[in-house]
Image: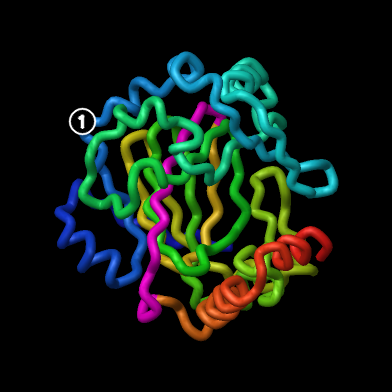
Amino acid sequence: MKIMGEVPRIHRPDLEEFTQRWLVEGQPVVITGGMEGWEAPTKWTPQYLSEHCGDNEVPVRKLSPDGETLVKRMPLREYLAQLVDSPEASRHGSIGEVPLRQVLWQVERDLGPTPYRRSAVGDLAVMIGRKTYAPLHFHGSTDALSSLVVGTKRFVLFDPAQPASLYPRAWYDPGFYNFSFLDLDTDKQVDPTRFPDFERLVGLECTLHAGEALFIPVHWWHTVYGNDDFNILLVDFFDAPLNRWKFPFPGVRSLVQRTVERATPRRLVDWYTTHA
């Protein structure tokens, strides 16, 4: 894998510039200065969140030794205490893609306005943890604006126009069609005999600090690493028009999955995912 450079950075563009130069063109960009005036980056410590939101029940996701995702529900206060007190933070799991209205609704007032947000504040996806790792994946039908409120995260992004090197999972897998077989966790090495095209993969990277946001266009592959600091990421997912989908790959598989999801009863999809 080769990292060919940094994701471009731009300071507080107006909405028209962001839309025409980056969103319409489907190119990733880091926005700095977009959270000026927000109180959350300085207020949202584990102690503050425990005091104001500690009784909220949250789903905490962990990986078992065999790779299965386990979900345990607990009060936010309990999770934060485990996360802060343990040197082995990653074994306590993370909170991922839970709507803000379910986790941190009591402190919504700490989030200020921004011209780039498309969703209601309560619909923003919250991700909380330490030493977090998001496997290589793409978003099937949405753009995403990932705003880092607390901490530091490193993103590595890949243009979808290199499908062989990305080793996507089966197109018909409803739970993982947008994930890769590659495991890019920093503690592991990619097997060159199993993934010989991995060395041809070309990516861009960026490190987000509190107060910065990354625009991830639809179908751009990415993996995310959180450092040892406590971190909180808010993600605004919004529909990307079909004319910006990447065809034939991975647009075709995304279109098939969206059609299947709309035509299949939810209980059948859940059964297939569980028993696959």
Query: Which quadrant does the N terminus fall into?
Result: bottom right
The answer to whether residue 99 is above or below residue 262 is above
Q: Nearer the viewer, residue 251 or 25?
A: 251
Q: Is residue 14 above or below residue 172?
A: above
Tell me the residue at 48%/59% (across/down).
157
**Residue 183: x and y, percent?**
69, 56
Q: Which is nearer the eye, 252 or 88?
A: 252
| Residue closest to the far bottom | 248
In this view of the protein, which residue sits in the foreground, 124 or 264? 264
> Visible in this render: residue 237?
yes
- Which residue was labeled with disc 1? 37
- Above or below, 265 relative to 34: below
Mark 1 element type: loop
Q: Magenta includes 134?
A: no
Note whether residue 6 is visible. Answer: no
Magenta highlight range = 228-244
Q: Position of residue 101 (x, y in %)?
A: 44, 37
Q: Is residue 240 magenta?
A: yes
Which residue occupies 71% across, 62% down? Answer: 267
Does residue 216 appear to the left or right of 228 in the view shown?
Answer: left
